[in-house]
Image: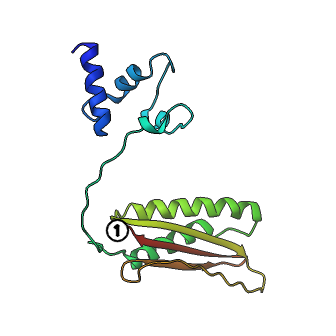
Amino acid sequence: MSDIAKDRRAHALKKRGSVSSFSSHEFQRRELQGRTKDCVSTVSYMDEPSQHGDASRLAVQLENTYQLGPSKHFPVAIVNHILKDVLTNYLQEERYEPELCRQMTKTISEVIKAQVKDLMIPRYKLIVIIHIGQLNSQSIIIGSRCLWNPKTDTFSSYVFRNSSLFALANVYAVYFE
């Protein structure tokens, strides 16, 4: 295929929003000739707004499903077991230290989010929030507010305590219509 034919085909595919049948690396080399020397990944380059305009971004075309409710409901009991296992494994022997607990909240929330995503429940947006604090004969009230549909949206929560700290893990599942 000649260079002119490839360029025309790439231009037509770009207008439709699909470059799946044409090598994306080859497409970028032709399109960006002279701008960059090496393009490692199309996604990483496309995410840089300074070098690419909005007009040249590829749009993903999704068709309507007309599905108003979930085909599979969020498994609250399974997520409760995930929360219990992760919090127990990570915090069983830990003492409260502010810097360590700050890092642990990030780590634990990423682990929980990954394990819940592995359940592959379609069309649910997940929000994972972890609170870790020192256990020192004090009380704390933690509240959260959100607009949601009580028929489809739900949450899972677990509280962990040891001799020096407490942890509260919440997973909110909001159905994406």
Viewer-proximal residue among 118 and 153: 153
Residue 175 visible in this rendered orientation of the protein: yes
111 to 87, vertically: above or below: above
Here the colouring is: rainbow
- Which residue is painted at 36% across and 78% down in the image? 152
Circle 1 residue: 177
**View extreme (front): residue:** 55
Could you tell me residue 114's position as x and y percent? 46, 59
Name above or below for residue 6 compared with residue 72.
above
Q: Is residue 80 left or right of residue 99?
A: left
In percent of width and height, residue 158 lies at 54, 79
Q: Secondary structure at mark 1?
A: loop
Evaluate whether residue 92 shows in this view: no
Q: How many marks?
A: 1
Q: Nearer the viewer, residue 59 or 165?
A: 59
Query: Residue at left 27%, top 35%?
Result: 20
Q: Nearer the viewer, residue 55 or 118?
A: 55
Q: Position of residue 58 (x, y in %)?
A: 38, 39
The amino acid pointed to by label 1 is Glu
Image quarter for residue 7? Answer: top left
Q: Quadrant of the C terminus?
A: bottom left
Residue at screen point 72% across, 69% down: 95
Q: Quadrant of the N terminus?
A: top left
Which residue reaches farthest left? 1
Mark 1 nearby-residue class (10 Å; few <14, some 14–19, many ≥20) = few
Residue toward you, 128 or 102:
128
Q: Is residue 171 above or below residue 13?
A: below
Q: Is residue 52 above or below residue 125?
A: above
Rendering coords of residue 53 (x, y %): 49, 35
Quadrant of residue 102 in the image? bottom right
Q: Is residue 148 left or right of residue 101?
A: left
* Residue shown at the point (74%, 79%) measured from the top left: 135
